[in-house]
Amino acid sequence: MILRRWVGRIRTADEAEYRAYVAATGGDDYLSTPGNLGWQMLFRDLGDGSSEVTTLSWWTDLEAIKAFAGEDYERARYYPEDDRFLLDRPPGVDHFRVADGSGPLRA
């Protein structure tokens, strides 16, 4: 199993709207891609009016990630309305091999 992690920043006041937006764009795309095992979104208030946003998605293998992100799978995938919310646009994502653990997601 592979974990794909993206981290960015938004205005804290936009959290609820951004959450719904991501669920309807990236979230739906994650779930409709064969090999996706689920996803989550995390928010962390940075105390300056901005929040860090992390999306985590779990995949069966690298080929499934490429089906979602394309051949340049280490680049972040963005959507047309992202600039409305994002304070920065990190160019890349991180991938991790999941070695062990417990919980609802298992390959």
Image (cartoon, grey):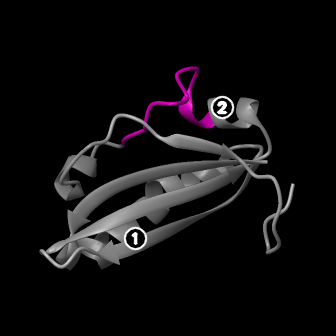
Taking 30 as reference, is 83 left or right? Answer: left
Closest to the observer: 42 or 15?
42
Taking 39 as reference, is 94 left or right? Answer: left
Mark 1 packing: few (<14 Cα in 10 Å), some, or many (20+)?
Answer: few
Q: Which residue is mark 1?
A: 20
Mark 2 packing: few (<14 Cα in 10 Å), some, or many (20+)?
Answer: some
Q: Could you tell me the amino acid type at mark 1?
A: Ala
Residue at disc 1, secondary structure: helix
Residue 67: which disc? 2
Taking 52 as reference, is 41 left or right? Answer: right
Q: Alpha carbon of mark 1 to alpha carbon of mark 2: how far? A: 23 Å
The magenta-colored residue range is: 67-78
Residue at (56, 26) in percent of width and height: 70
Residue 35 on image: x %, y %: 77, 44
Q: Could you tell me the amino acid type at mark 2?
A: Ala
Closest to the observer: 65 or 103?
103
Residue 16 on image: x %, y %: 32, 78
Q: Quadrant of residue 8?
A: bottom left
Closest to the observer: 3 or 28?
3
